[in-house]
Amino acid sequence: MTQLERAKNKKITTEMKRVAGDEGLTPEYIRSCIAEGTVVIPVNIKHHRRNKLRIIGIGKGLRTKVNANIGSSPDRVNIMEEKNKLDAAIKAGANSVMDLSTGGDIEKIRKMVLQRSVLPVGTVPIYQAACETARKGKKISEMSIDRIFGIIEQQAEQGVDFMTVHCGVTRRIIETLRKSKRITGIVSRGGAFLAQWIVYNNEENPLYEQFDRLLDVAYKYDVTLSLGDGLRPGSLADATDEVQIGELSVLGELAERAREKNVQVMIEGPGHVPLNQIEANVLLEKRLCKGAPFYVLGPLVTDVAPGYDHIVCAIGGAVAAASGADFLCYVTPTEHLRLPGVDDVTEGVIATRIAAHAADVAKGIKGASDWDMQISKARGSLNWKRQERFSINPEKFRQERKKSKPKDARVCTMCGEFCAMRQSDLLSKKTKF
Amino acid sequence: MTQLERAKNKKITTEMKRVAGDEGLTPEYIRSCIAEGTVVIPVNIKHHRRNKLRIIGIGKGLRTKVNANIGSSPDRVNIMEEKNKLDAAIKAGANSVMDLSTGGDIEKIRKMVLQRSVLPVGTVPIYQAACETARKGKKISEMSIDRIFGIIEQQAEQGVDFMTVHCGVTRRIIETLRKSKRITGIVSRGGAFLAQWIVYNNEENPLYEQFDRLLDVAYKYDVTLSLGDGLRPGSLADATDEVQIGELSVLGELAERAREKNVQVMIEGPGHVPLNQIEANVLLEKRLCKGAPFYVLGPLVTDVAPGYDHIVCAIGGAVAAASGADFLCYVTPTEHLRLPGVDDVTEGVIATRIAAHAADVAKGIKGASDWDMQISKARGSLNWKRQERFSINPEKFRQERKKSKPKDARVCTMCGEFCAMRQSDLLSKKTKF
């Protein structure tokens, strides 16, 4: 039985208890949210060492979680580097990782990630299907339906906790897309694979048409389905258009079908979205998908900053999460330029954690502002050791402070003897006014 | 006559015309906004080579502008480094710089900045007063009132375009502060200097008490006054408290007095502010200060990320500017840790420019989204040269892309042959569906 099925049966699982403990909420709250589909716990019943996993809940009233994408590409394959990227993501504080490998021995990389990761692991099975097909010298449109489902089952069997499936890329919406005046067409790899398949074969998306087949696999292993936005906007100009919203409506219907079959489900969201459209996007998702956890990539609030897209993502992610998004997929500085390396993973995770935390404070998530209080008290009393300890990346804190030593160790070189904290300190000692 | 006085007299100046041209708005619009006090053009009539300056307008309906703080501290003095920081700020696209030097020969540094900068220059004159006093072995509370005003006049005479003056730090508000339960007390250096002066001398803030004397100097040189928030919150816990809002109310009164005397004025804002309080802060400023341009430092939406405060600032700055803030002061990655170096200046300016631009798109500022359209069209057609040209930092774009070369130069190593753009490209060529 899946977490959802047990929740519906009023059963509180070990995983629900662990999530409740972690969030400082009651197990009954977690159970009721899972039952109504507003919280998911992505953990495959076959996941290797599942008791050692850092289980997470994603959804209503919980801390905003952060995912890091790792994985090879056809142009850059190095399993050691992927290992290091995984370790960097864990160290930087990601809550989950997705292995998006499309180059080299992707099965081997996935197995390494599943073995090594203490975090829940996600994948996009259509990537493997497409890679296999391409390697055989075939066209993407020649992917076999049975092989697609075979790969999904195989990955589920290996213990993958959540999977992106682009079930909403339907024939009808591809038609809408082709009539639209989009600037950047399709920017999702999975979306593009399926769109090609649909157009060349003149057939419906098998992940949509045989959605029940997909649900059967997901149910069997309690794989959480992450309904992908294969037609997400890839530029501000394409945001919140008829294509994106058309797909989202389909995902809403599918989410309900998944819940009926006791399959946990979350919804993926854009993409490139102007700052003033983010709140509406979150609201739409929550309405059309009946409060399903919203997993957003970015959103990127401008297209103009390749090299700094982790910052662009932090702006959009903070606003999205403050508006109700539950799960932020990081974007690294190298998005739009190249496959990220180890340092890019660290930068991406930290930037997105900042966004998630800022949103949690704004949303009033239990305990969120305590962290700020701790570091601020340490700052107010010029206690540098404690500031370091409570900073989001203590190693960075130490390195940066060391680069420029103050004459008086109580302050820093920004203000030196004129440190306002030191001055207010003097001030408070004079009691008469 | 100041820009404001001439605007009130229905006179359109060369500077108004230049701002109008730069913003794609009519000179009459600029004039009317200056007349009502919702736009300022900070340019001192004595600024050296004032015709070569990149004049800016700040305020209602204009692009959000970005300021970079540079300057020495008692612990780190290197005029070459300050020169390089100035050059870095200009290169990265800042719209103004403030020289906040408090170490070494600060007069010499300021003269260098005023000579070299093509951007409007701001200062905080109380720093010089405090430094001089400290160097004489005296206490800050021994600063002489005449010397404070003398320094203000001297800096105005040298051509400083805008000055931060902490006129709102009054005795009454210091009393409020001392009764308050603030976590981080005073975090503004200028605010702390004046608070000490007030408390130790048991006298009113001279910049408040002799505000007319200040206005006379500002009027004479058309120095734009930036009414500083000496009591801004230095932690989320202190945001939007009675101290901050008390000071803001005083600034609102002073802003009106400045305008009556034909002195251009803007208002400085926080500081550390939770994401969900930013909009209210902007609204309050606009109401209490009758639409005066709002110049915000950050706001920082969490206290926990020293080493990454440029990202924290980008989140807060984007939301503030989208809510109506007009002028963003950057925060560098090293805030709370050390004096920024040259690279920190670049990172700070770029992050803040991203925030400003994202907000301009959200606010619907004329022409803002054209930039995104340009790069996105280039991206959609896989034109890498044009993407580089339209990216916020072409040098960074080039460097990052070069670090990992794709097999096929049409794509990048993120997706290689599976590039969605390339796939959609194939898709659009098949016309039948």
Image (cartoon, coloured by chain):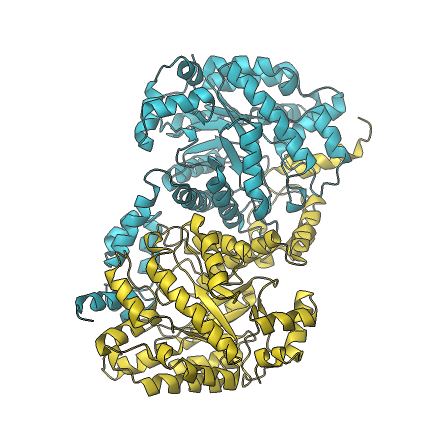
Chain colours: A cyan, B yellow
Where is residue A235 shown, x and y percent of the image? Answer: 64, 44
Q: Is residue A363 visible?
A: yes
Vertical placement of residue B216 versus A141, above or below:
below
Res B123 → quadrant: bottom left
- Left or right, B13 with reference to A422: right
Where is residue B313 shown, x and y percent of the image? Answer: 45, 55
Nearer the observer, B55 or A159: B55
How many marks can you see?
A: 0
Where is residue B370 shown, x and y percent of the image? Answer: 68, 54
Residue drawn at (44%, 48%), measured in percent from left and top?
Answer: B276
Vertical placement of residue A102 versus A9, above or below:
below
- Left or right, B109 with reference to A188: left
Q: Is residue B383 visible?
A: no
Nearer the observer, B68 or B126: B126
Nearer the observer, B42 or B90: B42
Quadrant where the C terminus of chain B is found in the figure: top right
